[in-house]
Image (cartoon, rainbow, N blue to C red):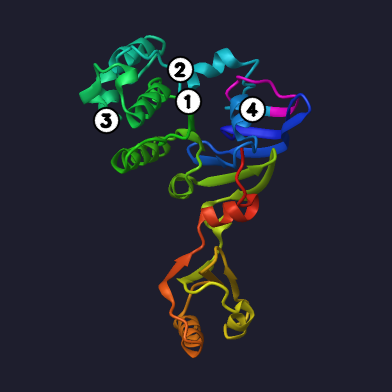
Amino acid sequence: MPAVEISGLVKRYGQTTAVDGLTLSAARGAVTGILGPNGAGKTTTVEICEGYRRPDQGTVRVLGLDPVHDAKALRPRVGVMLQSGGIPPSVPAADYLHLLNRFHAHPIEVPALLDLVGLTTVARTAYKRLSGGQQQRLSLAAAIIGRPELVFLDEPTAGMDPQARHATWELIGKMRAAGVGIILTTHFMEEAERLCDHVAIIDHGQLVAAGTPGQLTGTVGQLRFRAEAGLDIDSLLAALPPASLAKESPAGHYVIEVPGTVDPMLLAAVTAWCAERGVLANSLRIESRTLEDVFLELTGKELRP
């Protein structure tokens, strides 16, 4: 049985349909990323899974149970990390965790938990005095203190410095190895690519792509370089192997994509084409297509409110 199973989910707010027939599932003991631009419907979807909102149509099952009608049975088994809020600003970090400790049958002991999330040295510091990254780590500690079977993490590393971010990624990996299911929402595509076993990309309330990060990015090699704007892309394509793609985006930044990996012959063809036209190719590098590339292709590059 999946950790989360959503079928035909619909949620409306007045005339606005936030979630429009969404169907997806998340496995136990795996990290599932729910990604989407602002307003895509991911927050509403997660809030329905957490039991905070009721669906208008469709079914949602969390650990096999209805998150609204079976909320009492689910609460001890599910952890929720909020992106912000929910913690009294004047309460010291350790006191807040000691309070939560009393609500669980088999909690992680507070000293061990503080050490696990790297907050031992600020245990007596009020929440409002913590840095943004430390507040995030305290929220993470609150989500896992009860040893949940499933955890919802909303932007878990927002505001963290690189050291704290990598430590949090390591902790999430340990949770997954221990069999905990994790539902992750993030706008940080590198984070999703590193952590997620499965990714669901939603937009306008609908599923637009799903699969492992490797399945979504595919086997596409990229050669990127910078040069003067307005080079003749058609002429460049004519010099490249069949099935190659080339584009300029933004101005002066060129991307060539080929099935598989970039080989020496492609590199030679590009540099020869540039040399024939007196074009100096700067910052030439070979890459693979990233999850961020796929995300932008599917959801567009325009800013969302």
Query: Which structural element holds mark 3?
Result: loop
User: Which residue is the site of mark 4?
Assistant: 61
Nearer to us of marks 4 and 2 is 2
How many residues crowd around disc 1 within 10 Å: few (fewer than 14), some, or many (20 or more)? some
User: Which residue is the site of mark 2?
Assistant: 86
Q: Is residue 55 magenta?
A: yes
Asked if the residue under mark 2 is in contact with the one under mark 1, i.e. CB atoms within 8 Å, the reply is yes
User: Which residue is the site of mark 1?
Assistant: 82
Query: Which structural element holds mark 2?
Result: loop
Residue 41: give its label: none
How many residues crowd around disc 3 within 10 Å: few (fewer than 14), some, or many (20 or more)? some
Residue 64 shows in this picture? no
Prevailing secondary structure of the magenta residues? loop
Relative to residue 21, is residue 143 depicted above or below?
A: above
* Magenta extent: 50-59
Residue 118: give its label: 3
Q: Position of residue 172 (x, y in %)?
A: 39, 37
N-terminal label among 1 and 4:
4
What residue do we see at 58% from left, 81% from top? 236
